Amino acid sequence: MQLTYKYTLRPTKYQAVTIMTHLELCRRQYNYRLGARFKRWESSRTPLNACPLTAYRVSVEEIYKNIPLTRLQTSQGRKKYGSGNHLRKKGDVFSNIEGGYVQEPTVQLPDLKNTKRLFPDYQTLDAQVGQDVVNPVETSFPNFTTPDKNGNRRAKPKFKGFHYYKSLTYPKLDNLNIIKDESNRICIDLGKVGQVPMVFHRPIPTGFKVKTGTVIPEAHGWHISLTIEYQRVPVTVAEIHPSAENIMGIDLGIANDVYLSNGEQVENPRCLRAYAEKLARLQAKLASRVKGSKPGKILKGKIYKLPQFVARASRDFPFKTAHKLFDKCGVLVVEDLSLKNWTRHSPVNSDIEDGNLVYLPKGQAAKSGLNKSILDAAQGQFNTVIKYVAGKLDKTVVFVDPKGTFQRGNCLYKGHKKLSDRWHCCQCGESLETDKNSANPIKKIGLNYESGGTSTSLKKSLASREKEAGSLTVRP
């Protein structure tokens, strides 16, 4: 079982400058390693054992002149077999080319020694931190060059500017790195930085071991995210069978963030909208200040911290809401929304007049405002958080296909409503707001969820209703 605990750091001015220096060195190393990958890829784009259809812009010898064919294991590997023997032993020889392609990580990692020899500043950087820089390059570059199962590729990796490389990872931390200094302050010992005081607001749980630590500079100061692990605790997913007593359906909205099937609702805090007004006021004040003055610098600091405050408030709301909901039930049924499609731009509206192509208004200004409100509700983040909280509390979350839930009521009878209709009237006599009504069919669909299955749908619920109706009409 793995968890992530985040703590606030209180480094001295000297330690803060040292960490910023290490961040800059890692950023340069990242850009250099990414550039080397681009250079070799753009020069060849074929494996070594293949004949290219187009001529190389440079010779093969020039491209691969600094790449050794084999590598020597200089120390015992960390990975072990089940018997306890090391997977890689000291002195083993491995090939740097597999399937005709160069294994870039095994080539770039040993090359870090040459970097330290040519640039002495890298000797002040912790060796493990420098080696970890190669990992994001290896993650992003194959996603760009290799398509997935659907044939799609990720965007081209970008070189990182000064303000866009924001983390420093220590891949081999331990519980012993958390110590007390001479002033009896709790600190974390970081390589080549020293003992950095930290706000240890919650202790490491018994049995958990610290694995890695990522130092992050934020607007409110320095923070470190510690990844802790306890291997004896298995990662399990609770499977609670839905019943009428332990289930609750929720409909995600915009005006009110959550509508419950029991008639309750949770108000949307609208963090982005609320603080957008405050941001506009601060920027108007800044415009009236003398450029470079002390009051202007104070206002700049407030403006700089405001987005992070909004992000924290938006992240805090779904966690508190999820805990409150699971206190009332054991199974939550949520819509499986596709926010990517929901927040797309309006399609182009065009027509031909007198033989000429004319573009007509498409209402993009109104659609942009709606998209902003949808993203302000943070429904995608809510679904992610609710799965995480369910795993911690041994509860169950069921995601259902939202198709058809807007048109149907508690009896699953299909009505005819437009999106602009905000009141639901059903043949069974039910009459209530449309958003409050949507939680009821969602709950009905969730009752047909089978343990261990995937998300259920309205089609399965209608088939179950017809089956029940048929059994009631059969006479003995």
Image (tube, grey):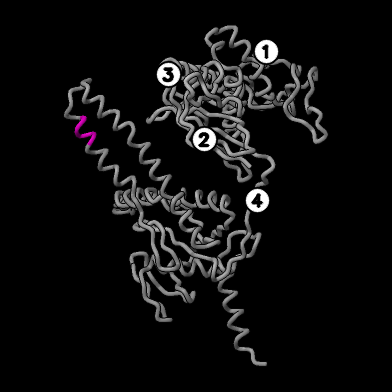
Percent from the top left, x then y, of residue 109? 64, 19
Give 427 or 203, whichever is nearer the viewer. Answer: 203
Give the structural element (helix, strand or loop) at label 3.
Answer: loop
Q: Amino acid at mark 3?
A: Thr
Structural distance between the alpha carbons of marks 2 and 3: 39 Å
Q: Amino acid at mark 1?
A: Lys
Percent from the top left, x then y, of residue 8? 45, 31
Give the structural element (helix, strand or loop) at label 4.
Answer: loop
Sequence order check: which comes first, mark 2 or mark 1?
1
Structural distance between the alpha carbons of marks 1 and 4: 50 Å
Asked if the magenta segment contains residue 284, the reply would be: yes
Secondary structure predominantly adopted by residues drawn in magenta: helix
The residue that disc 1 covers is 65
The residue that disc 4 covers is 236
Q: Is residue 161 left or right of residue 131?
A: left
Q: Amino acid at mark 4?
A: Thr
Q: Which residues are magenta?
A: 282-286
The residue that disc 3 covers is 12
The residue that disc 2 covers is 155
Above or below for 433 versus 89: below
